Amino acid sequence: MAINRYELVSRHNPSLMEANTRSPLSVGNGEIAFTADITGMQTFCEAYDIVPLCTMSQWGFHTIPSNNESGFYTINDLELKYYNTYGRKVGYAASNHNQEEIFDWLRVNPHRLHLGNIGLNMTLSNGSRVKIEDIKEINQTLDLWNGILISTFKVEGIPVTVKTLCHPERDILSFSVESELIKEGRLSVDIKFPYGSPEKSGADWTSDNLHSTDIIDFGEDAVDLMRILDNDLYFIRFRFSYGVHLKREGRNYFTLGHSGNGDSLNFSCLFSKSRPHGLIPLFHEVQKLCMEHWRGFWNSGGAVDFSQCTDNRAFELERRIVLSQYLTAIQCSGSMPPQETGLTCNSWYGKFHLEMHWWHAAHFALWGRINLLKRSMWWYKYILPKAKGLAEAQGYTGARWPKMVGPDGIDSPSPIGPLLIWQQPHPIIYGELIYRDKPCPETLNMFKDIVFETADFIASYAVYDKENNRYVLGPPLIPAQENHDPDVVLNPTFELEYCAFALNIANNWRKRMGLGINPIWQEVSEKMSSLPVKDGLYLSHERCPDTFTKFNFDHPSMLGAFGVLPGYKVDKSIMENTLNKVLSSWQLNEMWGWDFPMIAMTAARLGRPEIAVDALLMDCPKNTYMPNGHNNQIPKDDLPLYLPGNGGLLTAVAMMASGWDGCPEKNTPGFPKNGKWNVKWEGLNPMM
């Protein structure tokens, strides 16, 4: 019997009866997102200091001018740190070399921008402004099935209803407000614009004189604004219902109010990098499109139903899965790779980390939504010349993909990021996932350059160890478990497996295209070093004999060699010993959100489904999922949410339900067969 998807989704609608400043709700479409407080707008932004209330987009970046002559630094202005790489010097942007100003400027620019704050301006009967404590009888629900945020509350006993929408295909936000307070002249809408900031909020509210907002066109029901911040600009087009008007209150501050005696107002606003043209739809049209889109989303792709399970943890797991589908759709499915906090707020200045893109988006392929992964693949083609230039500058062939980047594809300086390599095979995997969905010559031709240039780099990066007739990785290298000295690291377990696996896939692409194998790729793959082992356990890397004592924190990345990957070089008995050792000796509180689904995937492949489920629901601070569905991380370090955790959860669950290539059990191999996990699923694809 087919899963009742409406019931599955609707029973997990997030609902707030009070202000939860750590768990605000968002609407979005993958390109833009709006995060709201309990009023359905950004009315009380000062109260939301852990998770700020932002309006963020894929294109909305800002650059603060530098102190040099041109106003901008480039990576060429920074002195590189050179590492001895088997007899030759290779430069990395890994040290400030007493160039702190240049180093820091390149790290924080460009940074993602809070495009504008849209909030209610309400007054009490005594004329004073409404505070958050004045909001009573709160009932806010995110209707997942229709993509509508509905917020109701009372001010001095007077009801207010706000509906908040995001257009499914355009960068348009739309709002409907109903209340007698409008008729009384006690409710209007504030629209405020900040200067850009690399901080978590993406907003600097103290520098009003450094930016401007100009009205560049107007009509009876529409106004166009132009925003100028240094050398950056963008536009906003407002369209509003009859009787509503826009009024300037300051240099970068406007209000929308009702000029008559109506008790409702609705408006839409389009944010755009370029000058907008044509009418934009009002609330009711956006609502119709929004409902059609989200019903189509939930009725397509995969679904997993735990309603027949008797394990008391099943409902919570199902809640996390449903909300993670929504969050990754609105935060991680855009035209560029997402930052780790998506379009909610800034982490690492709003830049995205390419080693995390797999965790954000690989699940789309397994959940039958390959189009959401494909949206960002053009960007790899766009930056391919820069990736090839980086490889060439270091003496390698092919394309070396950056780590922490903005839209321009220029790697940010860091003592860690430039020395990572585990993001390098990712684009090959994306190409393969897309090919599995559409195995045709067009797919091969579309992505062959990305796949082949990536393979060329991996093969040229590996160094032949003549004495042992093998290829080695590093030094210098920092593995996925980032707490290791790049001058020491040799042959990290996960990276060895991943590079060999990716080279095999690349050669399979050549075979499919009738090109014949690349003998260099084949040799490197076949002679890649064996995975490092000591005392029957896989190590973080070959020179790390104390993996499970001194280095037993951060990511237990060696597990990913058999779980995230098929593990062709893995001995299952050694990996099972390693899994057990991680569970018994690792500092689990120091792991990150995607580590828990990584453990689950390893356990599933090893035939340990009880451990797989336990890992997904492990009681650890960074495995917490908030009422809004976000994977909570470390607020004190400006990382209050962590979408790689949500994406990793979806990948693990798809694998646990539908299996993987060569899996003997095709139905829920990753869930216990103890009678408590009667899991129903449909529309999922197996893991590689």
Image: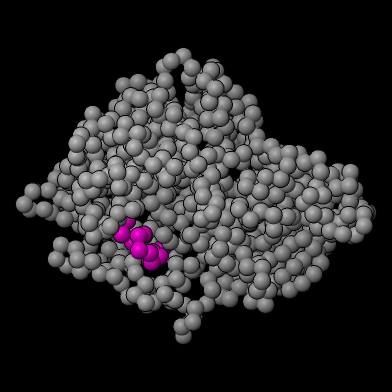
Q: In this view, does 200 lie to the left or right of 688?
A: right
Query: Could you say which is closer to the camera, residue 1 or residue 671?
Result: 671
Q: Report the magenta residues as a range.
A: 409-422
Q: Residue 223: x and y, percent? A: 75, 65
Q: Can residue 406 be seen in this view?
A: yes
**Compared to 437, does 29 lie above or below?**
below
User: Residue 204: which quarter of the image?
Assistant: bottom right
Q: Is residue 365 visible?
A: no
Q: Residue 293: x and y, percent? A: 62, 40
Query: Could you say which is closer to the camera, residue 585 or residue 675?
Result: 585
**Residue lying furthest bottom in this view?**
69
Q: Is the magenta stretch mostly helix, strand or loop?
A: loop
Q: Is residue 418 magenta?
A: yes
Q: Is residue 414 left or right of residue 4?
A: left
Give the residue drawn at x 63%, y 62%. Answer: 115
Give the residue drawn at x 42%, y 49%. Answer: 357
User: Residue 259: which quarter of the image?
Assistant: bottom right
Q: Residue 106: x and y, percent? A: 44, 70
The quadrant of the picture occupied by the C terminus is top left
**Residue lying furthest front in this view?**
549
Q: Is residue 676 left or right of residue 81?
A: right
Q: Is residue 642 left or right of residue 578?
A: right
Query: Could you say which is closer to the camera, residue 222 or residue 93?
Result: 93
The quadrant of the picture occupied by the N terminus is top right
Q: Residue 439: x and y, percent? A: 35, 38
**Compared to 308, does 213 lie above or below?**
below
Q: By what rule are the colours in the image chosen?
A: one colour
User: Residue 379: which quarter of the image?
Assistant: bottom left
